């Protein structure tokens, strides 16, 4: 299941966090009374990335963001404004959730995996 498919903004790549679509929060069951949940996502090279989805405690809108090792992911992949990040989730029979993250860059009108170019 595709959890998120987003084009990166300048702040997503220059800050240590990325704005996260509120509609994608259902893929991350958050314990009652908490405003964040940690998870591990594997990239196309099977490298683990420890990430965290957080929401605000105040205000009308939850305004979620992704942090944790997000900044490290951005730097290792050489991500820049306009690149795309796709996060998927697969629920195993035992109820465990497996997350995958991949980054793509548009070149001559086509999206290419950044992992394949490293």
Image (cartoon, rainbow, N blue to C red):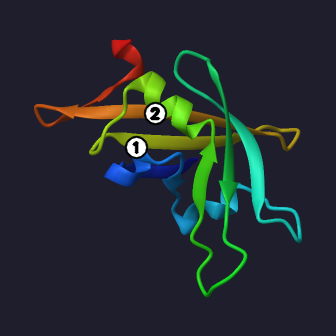
Q: Sequence-wise, which precedes: disc 2 or disc 1?
A: 1
Local secondary structure at mark 2: helix
Q: Give 78 or 14, whichever is nearer the viewer.
A: 14
Q: Which of the pair 14/35 is nearer the observer?
A: 14
Q: Position of residue 66 (x, y in %)?
A: 59, 51
- Identify the residue at horizontal 83%, vertical 38% (top origin): 93
Q: Residues within 10 Å of mark 2 (few under 14, many from 20)?
A: some
Task: Identify which residue, 42 or 33, lies in the foreground.
Answer: 33
Residue shown at the point (59%, 81%) measured from the top left: 61
Residue 74 image label: 2
Residue at the extreme bottom of the image, as rendered: 60
Q: Is residue 21 left or right of residue 79?
A: right
Q: Secondary structure at mark 1?
A: helix
**Left or right placement of residue 82 versus residue 1 in this view:** left
The CA distance from mark 2 to mark 1 is 6 Å
> Residue 26 shows which numbered tag?
none
Quarter of the figure with the C terminus: top left
Q: What percent of the width, then of the height, locates residue 97?
A: 76, 41
Question: Residue placed farthest to the top in the image?
Answer: 118
Numbered disc total: 2
In the image, residue 27 sits, relative to residue 80, either above or below, namely below
Q: Position of residue 70 (x, y in %)?
A: 56, 39
Residue 41 image position (x, y, % from top left): 65, 33
- Residue at label 1? 13
The reply to whether residue 9 is visible in this rendering is no
Location of residue 72 by image quarter: top right
Mark 2 vs 1: CB contact within 8 A: yes
Which image quadrant for residue 110?
top left
Image point (53%, 45%), residue name: 16
With 77 as the anchor, is 69 left or right in this view? right
């Amino acid at each position: 299941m595709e959890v998120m498919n987003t084009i990166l903004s300048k702040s997503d790549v220059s800050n240590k966090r990325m704005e996260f679509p509120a509609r994608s929060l259902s893929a991350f069951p958050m314990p009652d009374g908490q405003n964040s949940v940690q998870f591990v996502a594997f990239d196309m090279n099977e490298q683990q990335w420890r990430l965290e989805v957080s929401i605000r405690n105040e205000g009308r809108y939850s305004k979620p963001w992704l942090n944790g090792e997000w900044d490290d992911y951005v730097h290792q992949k050489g991500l820049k404004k306009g690149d795309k990040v796709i996060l998927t989730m697969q629920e195993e029979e035992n109820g465990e959730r497996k997350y995958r993250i991949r980054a793509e860059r548009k070149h001559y009108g086509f999206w290419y995996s950044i992992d394949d170019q490293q």
